[in-house]
Image (cartoon, coloured by chain):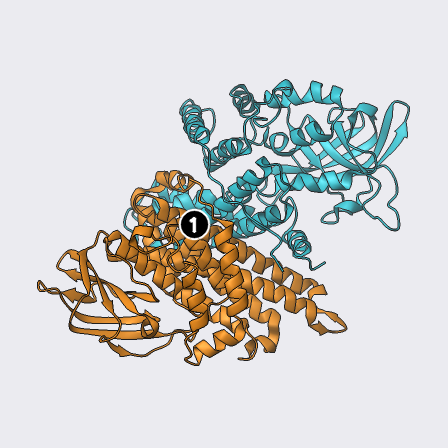
């Protein structure tokens, strides 16, 4: 199946990010100022829930469109919970719960079975490092009762919140639920593993976008910066470093496509998804290191915007399972199938 | 600014899936009857003819030249299945990948009609005459000279590092027909078909560090080439020689060469490896899956009539670096050998790892060094 995206949606998204998501917006967001104008513009265009069905409150676009918006958001280091809102929307849609407007987030993102739901429908437990929790209007929660899984939707207000930040300086708050009632509660067809995989797929899109961003930024910087009497882009060693950065960006882009297709299968293709998150995570690390080396001391300042993307790359590679986590999972899966199945497994990916 | 490379998403057509099963059945049958030992690769004219008879050489070529008029993606599936099991493809792979397409695109009609159908039948083995003693990565410095003579050209000089020259029936050679000009150092080169049995050609083996005879030095002593053997425009071959590399640089052969070592690692890991070993296997498999996607994407773009030079260079750079680094990763992940275990698996593992380790250095040299590739990518990024 070929997953392609609609250029009108992407043009709209790119215009909004270009107009409303400059470096100043990103810095202000880290200082605690919610980028209301950016969020409003995105929401008015139906972008946060692009690929959620219309009957559930989304825009009814393809999965490819929803993912491509995230990739652009990554390229612009957009400091808004687009991935989290889409993930919450997909979880709610699956549980046949109408998706409320406004920024959303999702829990758990770290530990399995963190929040329990009582027979009376009350939630208790803790969820750690929930992205953008303080900015969210509602939280979609995957809660457990024994082996059963439920999706709970509840307003952010009223949930105990202890603030924290990610490596990127974005909110990553701890939440505590002490016998709170959900606004909506429904059995979930999705378990923690699938939620983690979906979240990983979305992070891969963002990583691919941010790597495109730092490649553009690095090429442009190397052309402007003069040392030893010529632009540093003219030095072969810089050219080779940028060629390697391009390779990592290209690999992350292929990983983003793999993650998209892995989510399009009847059951998420864990092997392909794992491969995508591992490779994108490696690309994030290698790519960010090259971009910084090219930028020299300038890129290490707060003033320069390179860190908007590189810090997000370092945060995103770690979230929803890092390279090590998914590699163990993928390695176990491959080993269980045996040596003779290794090639057929690889060849079945496309 | 927009990024100047793009990997189109692609999926293999249904026809390719059925074809894959057909190729696997053929390979199983050949292995079962002792036609070849899987994993050893190598050269076999008998195997070449069988593959040709199946229609799996020149699959994308026009039917009037013996081709199958099938897609690049179908061809990709056939090639990767053969390489994945280490079939002896050396007798036809160069002609199938490069020489046939070059002849079809630039060759003279009488030559195309005489030669190309025989390639498709698996009857002809080709080699590539690019490198010379003083012209390695600097391909356009070639000085082996083709001088105009009555009815053709006379060739004098030497080619070196020519893989399979000692087995090949023909070479596609890049020869100097005019001096380079001050403004264009790429001017003055022409491509020719060379009959390897022509008088005046002598081939000297160069034994590689595995102790094997793969590449050669080829000496031309007043070798006559008829006019019809000129391939493409006189003096203007640099563009056609570089376009050819988009085909050479992106295929499965650019990431799969050390794959057998990973297969044997998985075998010796057993069903339930510890986390360290599982992680190492998982990381390698992830690299392979994503590389393969990029490589297939290039095949898809070739199919769409594009010339994805930069994308092909990116795939080869990433692919060869990966396949080169794999043996060392496998070495360090390997479970320790058990003294009391007279295990054939361990022997298989050691043999595969030894082979992969020894071939590793060449992987980032052949078909364009890592440094040359990164220069091509840098040019694509607008840096030079």
Chain letter, colour cyan in render: B
Give the colour chain A carries in the figure: orange
Snapshot quadrant of residue B163: top right
Taking the image as shown, residue B78 lies to the left or right of residue A128, namely: right
Position in image of residue B180 (x %, y %): 86, 45
Position in image of residue A285 (x %, y %): 48, 65
Taking the image as shown, residue B52 lies to the left or right of residue A336, namely: right
Position in image of residue B293 (x %, y %): 48, 45
Can residue B281 be seen here? The reply is no
Callout 1 environment at 10 Å: few (<14), some (14 to 19), or many (20+)? many
Q: Nearer the viewer, residue B190 or B163?
A: B190
* Residue B375 sits above or below residue B308 on the image: below
Q: Which chain does the numbered disc 1 sit on? A: A
Point 61% across, 33% down: residue: B97
Quadrant (top left/top right/bottom left/bottom right) for the C terminus of chain A: top left
Point 28% across, 56% down: residue: A91
Can residue A258 be seen here? The reply is yes
Point 66% across, 47% down: residue: B368
Taking the image as shown, residue B306 lies to the left or right of residue B235, namely: left
Position in image of residue B222 (x %, y %): 85, 30
* Residue A237 sits above or below residue B285 on the image: below
Point 72% across, 73% down: residue: A226
* Residue B147 sits above or below residue B284 on the image: above
Label 1 sits on a secondary structure element that is helix
Q: Nearer the viewer, residue B299 or A286?
A: B299
Q: Nearer the viewer, residue B9 or B19?
A: B9
* Residue underneath mark 1: A64
Quadrant (top left/top right/bottom left/bottom right) for the N terminus of chain A: top left
View extreme (left): residue: A119
């Amino acid at each position: 199946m070929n997953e392609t995206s609609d250029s009108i949606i992407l043009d709209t998204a790119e215009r909004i990010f270009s107009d409303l998501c400059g470096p100043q917006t990103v810095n202000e967001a880290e200082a605690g100022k919610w980028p209301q104008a950016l969020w409003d513009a995105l929401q008015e265009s139906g972008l946060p829930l692009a690929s959620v069905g219309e009957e559930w409150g989304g825009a009814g676009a393809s999965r490819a469109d929803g993912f491509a918006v995230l990739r652009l958001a990554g390229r612009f280091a957009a400091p808004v919970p687009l991935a989290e809102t889409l993930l919450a929307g997909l979880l709610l849609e699956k549980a046949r719960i109408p998706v409320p407007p406004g920024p959303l987030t999702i829990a758990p993102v770290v530990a399995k079975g963190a929040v329990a739901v009582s027979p009376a429908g009350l939630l208790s437990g803790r969820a750690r490092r929930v992205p953008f929790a303080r900015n969210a209007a509602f939280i979609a929660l995957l809660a457990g009762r024994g082996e059963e899984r439920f999706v709970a939707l509840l307003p952010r207000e009223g949930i105990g919140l202890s603030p924290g930040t990610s490596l990127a300086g974005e909110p990553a708050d701890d939440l505590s639920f002490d016998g709170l009632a959900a606004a909506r509660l429904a059995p979930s067809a999705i378990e923690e593993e699938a939620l983690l995989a979906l979240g990983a797929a979305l992070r891969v899109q963002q990583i691919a976008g941010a790597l495109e961003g730092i490649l553009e930024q690095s090429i442009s910087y190397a052309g402007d910066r003069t040392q030893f009497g010529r632009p540093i882009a003219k030095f072969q060693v810089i050219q080779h470093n940028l060629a390697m950065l391009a390779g990592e960006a290209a690999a992350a882009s292929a990983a983003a496509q793999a993650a998209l297709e892995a989510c399009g299968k009847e059951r998420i293709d864990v092997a392909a998804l794992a491969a995508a998150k591992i490779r994108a995570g490696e690309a994030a690390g290698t790519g960010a290191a090259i971009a910084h080396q090219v930028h020299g001391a300038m890129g290490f300042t707060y003033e320069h915007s390179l860190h908007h993307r590189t810090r997000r790359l370092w945060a995103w590679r770690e979230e929803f399972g890092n390279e090590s986590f998914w590699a163990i999972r993928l390695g176990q899966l491959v080993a269980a199938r045996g040596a003779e199945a290794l090639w057929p497994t690889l060849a079945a990916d496309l | 600014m927009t990024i100047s490379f793009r990997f189109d998403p692609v999926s293999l057509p249904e026809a390719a899936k059925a074809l894959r099963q057909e190729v696997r059945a053929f390979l199983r049958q050949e292995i079962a009857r002792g036609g070849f030992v899987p994993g050893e690769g190598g050269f076999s004219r008998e195997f070449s003819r069988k593959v040709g008879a199946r229609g799996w050489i020149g699959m994308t070529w026009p039917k009037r030249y013996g081709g199958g008029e099938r897609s690049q993606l179908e061809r990709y599936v056939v090639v990767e299945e053969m390489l994945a099991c280490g079939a002896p493809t050396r007798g036809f792979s160069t002609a199938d990948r490069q020489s046939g397409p070059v002849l079809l695109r630039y060759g003279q009609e009488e030559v195309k009609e005489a030669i190309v159908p025989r390639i498709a039948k698996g009857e002809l083995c080709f080699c590539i005459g690019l490198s010379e003693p003083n012209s390695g990565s600097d391909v356009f410095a070639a000085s082996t000279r083709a001088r105009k003579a009555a009815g053709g050209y006379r060739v004098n000089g030497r080619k070196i590092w020519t893989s399979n020259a000692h087995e090949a029936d023909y070479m596609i050679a890049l020869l100097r027909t005019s001096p380079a000009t001050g403004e264009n150092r790429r001017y003055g080169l022409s491509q020719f078909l060379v009959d390897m049995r022509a008088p005046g050609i002598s081939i000297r083996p160069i034994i590689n560090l595995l102790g094997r005879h793969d590449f050669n030095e080829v000496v031309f002593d007043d070798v006559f080439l008829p006019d019809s053997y000129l391939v493409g425009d006189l003096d203007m071959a640099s563009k056609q020689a570089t376009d050819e590399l988009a085909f050479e640089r992106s295929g499965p052969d650019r990431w799969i060469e050390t794959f057998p070592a990973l297969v044997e690692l998985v075998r010796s890991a057993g069903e339930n490896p510890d986390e360290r070993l599982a992680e190492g296997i998982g990381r390698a498999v992830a690299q392979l899956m994503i590389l393969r996607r990029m490589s297939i994407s290039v095949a898809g773009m070739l199919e769409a009539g594009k010339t994805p030079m930069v994308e092909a260079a990116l795939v080869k750079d990433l692919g060869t670096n990966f396949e080169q680094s794999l043996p060392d990763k496998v070495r360090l992940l390997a479970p320790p050998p058990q003294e009391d275990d007279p295990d054939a698996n361990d022997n298989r593992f050691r043999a595969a790892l030894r082979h992969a380790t020894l071939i590793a250095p060449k992987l980032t040299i052949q078909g364009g060094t890592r440094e040359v590739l990164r220069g091509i990518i840098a040019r694509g990024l607008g840096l030079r």
